[in-house]
Amino acid sequence: MTNEIKNNYLYHKPLTAEAINSLQQKGYKYLQVQGFTMDHHAEYVEPHYLMLVPKKELPLDIYEPINSELVNEWIKNNSSNDRLEVFLADSKHPH
């Protein structure tokens, strides 16, 4: 596990509409989508959890616009989905 992945996991916060609004006010426009297994290895086919890493510039990896319908759907279903967890990386830690 890289330090970036470790820090994102250790300092993650719940994905909420308030957190997204706060990021937008700070100038973030994208969320880099990172998928992981239960033991924190990269996995995009059947991940155990997704980490959404806030980005101000368009990243080259998998991303989702911060105000997209998909992110809003993840917010609505996050507490009721026991197969896939979706976390929001803390924007205060270096990415």
Image (cartoon, grey):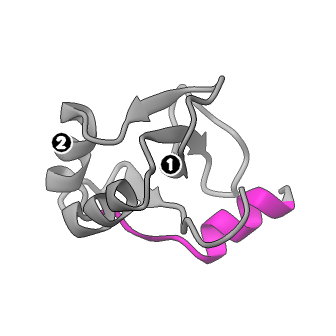
| Magenta highlight on residue 57 | no
How many residues crowd mark 1 within 10 Å: few (<14), some (14–19), many (20+)? many
Where are the magenta residues, as a range? 3-15
How many residues crowd mark 2 within 10 Å: few (<14), some (14–19), many (20+)? few
**Residue name at image x 64 percent, y 64 percent:** 8
Q: Secondary structure at mark 1?
A: loop
Residue to which mark 1 is pinned:
48
**Residue name at image x 25 percent, y 34 percent:** 68
Tell me where residue 52 appears, x and y as whole percent: 49, 49
Left or right: residue 40 compared with residue 56? right
Q: Quadrant of residue 42?
A: top right
Tell me where residue 32 appears, x and y as whole percent: 54, 39
| Frontmost residue, 82 versus 57 | 57
Tell me where residue 67 appears, x and y as whole percent: 25, 40
**Dominant secondary structure, magenta:** helix
| Frontmost residue, 33 versus 37 | 33
Type of residue at label 2?
Glu
